[in-house]
Amino acid sequence: MQDPRSKDNPRTTGIARGLTVDNAFTAESLYGTRREPTYSGALSFLRRRYSRDLTGVDVAVTGIPLDTATSNRPGARFGPRAVREASAQLAWNRPYGWDFDPLDRLAVVDYGDCHWDYGRPEEVPVAIEEHIGRIADAGASPLSIGGDHFLTFPILRAMAKRRGKLSLLHFDAHSDTWADTVGSGRVDHGTMFFHATREGLVEPSRSVQIGLRTHNPDTLGFHVLDAPWVHRNGVKAVIEQARSVLGDNEVYLTFDIDCLDPGFAPGTGTPVCGGLSTAMALEILRGLRGIAIVGMDIVEVAPAYDVSEITALAGATIAHEALGLYACRPGARKGGEAGDGERRTGG
């Protein structure tokens, strides 16, 4: 009987030859899924190459480690690191339920993190807006990992300057439309969409908020599918309503992890009982295939309050699913086009 430890054992050599190491730095192609031990190696989002070169890039994943706008528990500044680490568990295979691998169609890099002087919090909004602006000006779409939810506001400023008023697809336990003093310059993760509406960055009548379960009497005209409505009517109805509201408008997707019930995502700053399950959220995202998504974020993962990394894993999985939406947006490349042989094999 052959020694299983032997270098000539086909059961082990085949696996070893299929693996690569430290793809975050060594990957030669921006396309394709590659196998790497999930328990080791340099960590980037889905083992994508770290790069500030956005030539030919479709999606730039970037961390925004902000948590100074929180109203309850801080710690979301560690969210980008935690989500990247959890994504290593997903990087070996395509997202389940999709009939293709988004990484075969999309050139994706990990662009690293946005930086600012932590001692000058007043500079944070401009730093984030300029950071996202550089990504957009290079022709790439941002996939941002937070950080607290305030970061969506300067991202919307950057995107709206370049694409005009957007539809907002917003998953959350909170509306984040509480009234604030216009022009006050406050940095608050509960008032961003009040200001985004007042500044004309989003169109509430063509936007939808999913999973809300905290009281705010003024919807500002957003279509609200709150958590009780979702539970009563089901995922199919959510998908139908969201598609009807969004239409063919360009969409910015923002997913606050506290949209999920704390049983599925305890590691967050402001948990609220009665939310969606991870399975429901993933099914809704898959059902929105074909929407005109132009940018996305996953926010409010706070690993200090997490249990067995389930919140970070949920965040990484949601971002992985979102790549499928990017790959299916109108005008996106399809499999089988010229050059796809390289994409499928990863270079």
Image: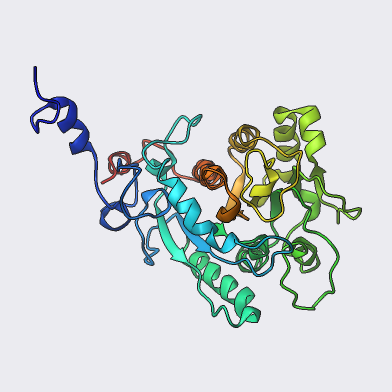
- Residue at point 43%, 52% (across, down): 45
Residue 142 appears in the rendering? no
Q: Quadrant of residue 228?
A: top right
- Residue at point 83%, 74% (across, down): 182
Could you tell me which quadrant the N terminus lies in? Answer: top left
Give the vertical position of 91 relative to 115 (above or below). Answer: above
Give the vertical position of 131 relative to 6 (above or below). Answer: below
Give the vertical position of 180 relative to 295 (above or below). Answer: below
In the image, taking residue 293 as reference, residue 182 lies left or right, namely right
- Residue at point 53%, 48% (across, down): 312
Q: Position of residue 327 (x, y in %)?
A: 49, 43
Q: Position of residue 89 (x, y in %)?
A: 41, 41
Q: Position of residue 298 (x, y in %)?
A: 59, 52
In the image, taking residue 242 as reference, residue 178 lies left or right, namely right
Q: Quadrant of residue 343?
A: top left
Q: Quadrant of residue 11?
A: top left
